């Protein structure tokens, strides 16, 4: 019987293991998790879990009995130290796990500051796993000051939670504006105004020189000013976990490179989720989203069993900040025009990204209807005229 090992116990790894059983694989499945917990949801960590609105057990994707019933062996709290591609085995501390086929669902890790910039100071946190949030939770006391380094969605979500818990929040962003890499100025303006209405202070276009310890954290900034806080949170992006794959000789380039079916440069090894770099409409991309982790992992499961089907990503993302739900469809790379569309209420709005006459992406703020229509149009490669989008009275659904 074919032995399948899944290295990485996040959303993609759990989805892949479950899908293998659904598709009828009756051989051994081993899921290796680097953390002591069962596979769990990550998006609620810095929101509902930190706010005390979700318990640890509610985070788990499946209860422990599921893995027993499905005969999925879960190895917890063990870090792989190597992959022997010739001997087809994963090396753990003091143990070897043989495989016939291997799936890498290794995820990603937060970017860190170098030690020379104060990256190892106590009171500086990066949020990626349960242990990170458990360490951070005690810092969230009303009246304290928190410095958030990075004005992307990770930083803004942390700012929203901190403000809700009564902290004084300052966000610094080295780029000229928040959300510089991921959203149009119009979307950035929307969220800047939203956060300012809740008391958040922004320092945009100001880089971090270094952090200093002592009583709390003091940030020395590129304009010569300083900013003091009780603690700081890093939100400067994530990096794919490719170290094991690189050491094993797999082709890696800003991620573990896979073909349209999720296969790596080794015919017996696949990859899915944040760590994988995959083809999409003539380019190679990484998609950092829960939905892609699930969808790609399930496609890889089928292909590990011989389906031979290409995976076609359908990029979509979301972010919850205060009472605003942002939903994003598509990828906005290469856009040259933004069209704003009013929603059904004063609190709803959407921004539509065009490259020439081609619709690339939609940012929908509290406007699920615009998001769903935009998503379906993008997936169907259909582009409404910008003038139709801008006209709130025009029924875009009719174009479907």
Image (cartoon, grey):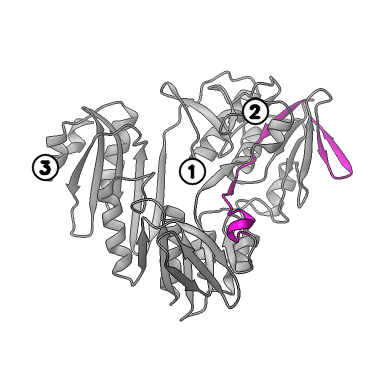
Tell me the SS state at disc 1.
Answer: loop
x then y, percent, for residue 91: 82, 37
Is 342 situated above or below 296? below
The numbered mark at residue 289 is 1
Q: Nearer the viewer, residue 64 or 214?
A: 214
Tell me the SS state at disc 2.
Answer: strand
Work out which quarter of the rendered image holds the C terminus and state it: top left
- Tell me if mark 3 has few (under 14), some (14-19) or many (20+) residues whose alpha carbon lies within 10 angstroms of its own: few
Q: Which residue is mark 2?
A: 270
Give the residue displayed 34% in from the left and 30% down from the top.
379
Magenta-drawn segment: 90-119
x then y, percent, for residue 99: 79, 29
> In the orientation shown, which residue stands out farthest toward the bottom?
143
How far apart in space, not on screen, are marks 3 and 2 (Cα)?
46 Å
x then y, percent, for residue 107: 61, 42
The numbered mark at residue 391 is 3
Does the segment drawn in magenta span residue 114? Answer: yes
Left or right: 286 as drawn, with respect to 386: right
**Which image quadrant for residue 375?**
top left
């Amino acid at each position: 019987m074919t032995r399948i090992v899944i290295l990485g116990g996040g959303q993609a790894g759990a989805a892949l293991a479950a899908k293998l059983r659904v598709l009828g694989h009756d051989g051994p499945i081993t899921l290796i998790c680097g953390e002591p917990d069962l596979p769990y949801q990550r998006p609620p960590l810095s929101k509902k879990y930190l706010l005390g609105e979700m318990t640890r057990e509610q985070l788990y994707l499946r209860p422990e009995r599921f893995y027993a019933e499905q005969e999925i062996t879960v190895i917890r709290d063990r870090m792989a130290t190597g992959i022997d591609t010739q001997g087809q085995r994963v090396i753990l501390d003091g143990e070897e796990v043989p495989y016939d086929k291997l799936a890498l669902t290794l995820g990603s890790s937060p970017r860190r500051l170098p030690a020379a910039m104060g990256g190892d100071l106590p009171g500086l946190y990066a949020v990626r796993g349960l242990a990170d949030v458990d360490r951070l939770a005690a810092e969230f006391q009303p009246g304290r000051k928190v410095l958030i380094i990075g004005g992307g969605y990770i930083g803004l979500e942390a700012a929203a939670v901190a403000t809700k818990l009564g902290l004084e929040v300052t966000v610094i962003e080295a780029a000229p504006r928040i959300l510089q890499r991921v959203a149009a100025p119009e979307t950035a303006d929307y969220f800047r105004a939203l956060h300012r209405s809740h008391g958040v202070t922004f320092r945009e276009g100001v880089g971090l020189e270094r952090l200093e310890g002592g009583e709390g954290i003091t940030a020395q900034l590129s304009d010569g000013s300083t900013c003091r806080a009780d603690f700081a949170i890093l939100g400067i992006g994530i990096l794919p976990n490719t170290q094991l794959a690189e050491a094993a000789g797999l082709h890696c380039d800003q991620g573990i490179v896979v073909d349209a079916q999720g296969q790596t440069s080794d015919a017996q090894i696949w990859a899915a989720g944040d760590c994988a770099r995959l083809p999409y409409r003539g380019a190679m991309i990484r998609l950092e989203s829960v939905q892609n982790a699930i969808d790609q992992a399930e496609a890889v499961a089928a292909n590990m069993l011989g389906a031979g089907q290409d995976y076609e990503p359908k990029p979509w993302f979301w972010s919850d900040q205060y009472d605003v739900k942002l939903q994003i469809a598509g990828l906005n790379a290469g856009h040259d025009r933004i069209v704003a569309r009013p929603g059904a209420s004063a609190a709803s709005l959407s921004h539509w990204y065009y490259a020439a006459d081609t619709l690339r992406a939609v940012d929908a703020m509290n406007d699920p209807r615009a998001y769903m229509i935009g998503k379906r149009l993008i997936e169907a490669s259909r582009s409404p005229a910008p003038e139709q989008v801008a006209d709130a009275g025009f029924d875009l659904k009719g174009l479907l």
